[in-house]
Image: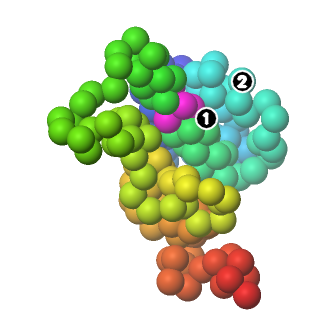
């Protein structure tokens, strides 16, 4: 019960927690409650609006996803503050006048969105590392076999 997330990411905390939990002999409900107890306050605050009666694996997955989103949002805020304090960098020549400021460049349009938007680099990388579909974000398939993409294009 003394294990805490502290300054670590939820993913790092969960690895340490699972290692210790495997030797505890506690049942799954007790492990889930101990995991929730050790989370940092900012994660607990976000979990208030979610169902935490999930299994330990479900709670860990939810907490990791929330932590990734919170960290991404913090980076976005910092980048926004930086962009407001500095003018966009020039790339030189006539092309620079028509160029997009840093942070607003897009690789591919994100599916299922209107207009020209894209997944953030962090979200794209997270989905790739987690073997999630780049179109809908679900597990079990890739963009080439995405049922949501197929429905959207019918």
Q: Quadrant of residue 85?
A: top left
The picture places residue 11, in percent across and down from the top left corner, at: 46, 41
* Magenta region: 70-74
Residue in the picture at 67% in, 59% down: 114
In the rendered image, the residue lying farthest to the top is 85
Foreground pick, 45 / 92:
92
- Other-residue count near label 2 (Cα within 10 Å), few / some / many at <14 / 14–19 / ≥20: few
Upstream in sequence: badge 2 or badge 1: 1
Residue in the picture at 18% in, 35% down: 92
Please state, as top left, top right, bottom left or bottom right, where the N terminus lies in the image. top right
In the rendered structure, find residue 45 and report the number of the disc placed on it: 2
In the rendered structure, find residue 100 and report the number of the disc placed on it: none
Taking 51 as reference, is 77 left or right?
left
The picture places residue 81, in percent across and down from the top left corner, at: 46, 16
**Disc 1: which residue:** 35
Taking 18 as reference, is 56 left or right?
right
In this rendering, which labeled residue sits more in front, label 2 or label 1?
Answer: 2
Q: Is residue 7 visible?
A: no
Please state, as top left, top right, bottom left or bottom right, where the C terminus lies in the image. bottom right
Q: Quadrant of residue 12?
A: top left
- Other-residue count near label 1 (Cα within 10 Å), few / some / many at <14 / 14–19 / ≥20: many
Residue in the picture at 68% in, 26% down: 44
In the rendered image, the residue lying farthest to the front is 94
Residue in the picture at 48% in, 23% down: 80
Instruction: Give the alpha-carbon distance from disc 2 to disc 1, as whole Å.
Output: 15 Å
Decide: marks 2, 1 in contact (CB < 8 A)? Answer: no
Q: Secondary structure at mark 1?
A: helix
């Amino acid at each position: 019960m003394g294990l805490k997330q502290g300054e670590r990411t939820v993913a790092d905390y969960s690895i340490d927690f699972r290692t210790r939990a495997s030797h505890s002999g506690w049942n799954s409900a007790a492990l889930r409650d101990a995991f929730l107890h050790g989370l940092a306050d900012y994660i607990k605050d976000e979990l208030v609006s979610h169902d935490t009666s999930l299994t330990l694996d479900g709670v860990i997955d939810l907490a990791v996803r929330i932590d990734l989103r919170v960290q991404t949002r913090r980076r976005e805020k910092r980048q926004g503050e930086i962009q407001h304090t500095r003018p966009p960098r020039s790339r030189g020549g006539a092309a620079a006048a028509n160029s997009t400021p840093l942070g607003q460049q897009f690789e591919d349009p994100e599916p299922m969105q209107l207009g020209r938007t894209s997944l953030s680099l962090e979200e794209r990388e997270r989905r790739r590392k987690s073997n999630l579909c780049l179109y809908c974000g679900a597990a079990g398939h890739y963009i080439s076999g995405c049922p949501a993409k197929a429905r959207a294009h019918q």
